[in-house]
Amino acid sequence: MAKNALCIGINDYPGTDGDLAGCVNDAHDWAAALRQRGFEVRQLLDHEATLAAMTEAIASLIGAARTGDTLVITYSGHGTWVEDTDGDEPDARDEGLCPHDIASAGPLLDDDIHRLFDARAAGVRLVLISDSCHSGSVTRGDEADLDPGGPRARFLPPAAWMKAGTLPRVARASSLTLVGGLRQAGGDLLLAGCRDEEFSWDTAFGGRPNGAFSFYALKTLAQDKPQTYEEWFAAIRRYLPSTRLPQEPQIFGTRSARRVPVLA
């Protein structure tokens, strides 16, 4: 039984004025944690993470997997949306991940991810961890690790990468839903940085940029040593949401999938 992973981190978004700081660090940190747990890891960072490269890497990862294998895909970067054209989205939006070349190639949409995931062989376990896009309700969590200063949202609005005259007509700010879209992309489990209507935040801890969700997910994985995804998620929720990081992490999957040993 093989264990393989793909870790994507994108700080650099040319042509968008939307660069981030912590996503490449996230990818390195996820890769290190996964290698410690016996995964073979491929990384796509910044200019490597084009739309074509992301599509090829996911397809290759899934195409090579056999019954009993475990696959993990981590993504740190911007999320975005376009107008839904096939009527399968209740909010009239297709959500997507933003590749490095989004300004010229466009996003990797949830429909595309769904088709890629559907190609996996029976009995292949697939976990998607997305530290991007929307997050919301404000409570007071433990912020002792967080550096001073303002976090930056990991959401790239269509106006930042689409050409004038091609912007989608849908503009209901209350319906921003990357997580909802990715939830329908398939796989056994989705761990997401936030709720549908929220943002995930790019910030810094101890002078080092990271995504808030990735930082606390990896911190609790190392310190709490959770046995199941359910326990891991509960540990992360001790830190998020907080006053300055108003994002509520989400877990989607069946009860049995949530109780599978973490990264096994």
Image (cartoon, grey):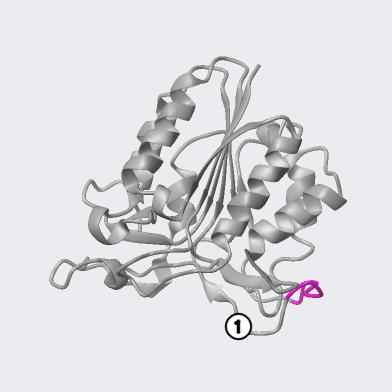
Depicted 254 relative to depicted 241: above or below: above
| Relative side of 195 to 149, left or right | left
Q: Which residues are magenta?
A: 140-146
Residue 70 sits in which quadrant? top right
- Direction front: furthest residue: 47
| Classed neighbour count for the residue bearing mark 1: other residues with Cα under 10 Å, few (<14), some (14–19), many (≥20) | few
Taking the spot 56% from the left edge, 66% from the top edge, the residue there is 200
Is residue 148 in sight in this rendering?
Answer: yes
Residue at x-position 32% and y-position 56%: 101
Could you tell me which quadrant the C terminus lies in? top right
Q: Is residue 194 magenta?
A: no
Does residue 20 appear to the left or right of 53 in the view shown?
right
Residue extending farthest right: 224
Instruction: Where is residue 221? Give x, y as percent.
Output: 78, 48
Given the current orientation, which residue lies at the most extreme left position? 165
Q: Position of residue 125 (x, y in %)?
A: 59, 27
Residue at (71%, 74%) from the top-left corner?
207
The residue indicated by pointer 1 is 150
> What's the residue at 59%, 51% (across, down)?
27
Q: Position of residue 115 (x, y in %)?
A: 36, 33
Mark 1, secondary structure of its residue = loop
Q: x and y percent of residue 90 in the render?
A: 35, 54
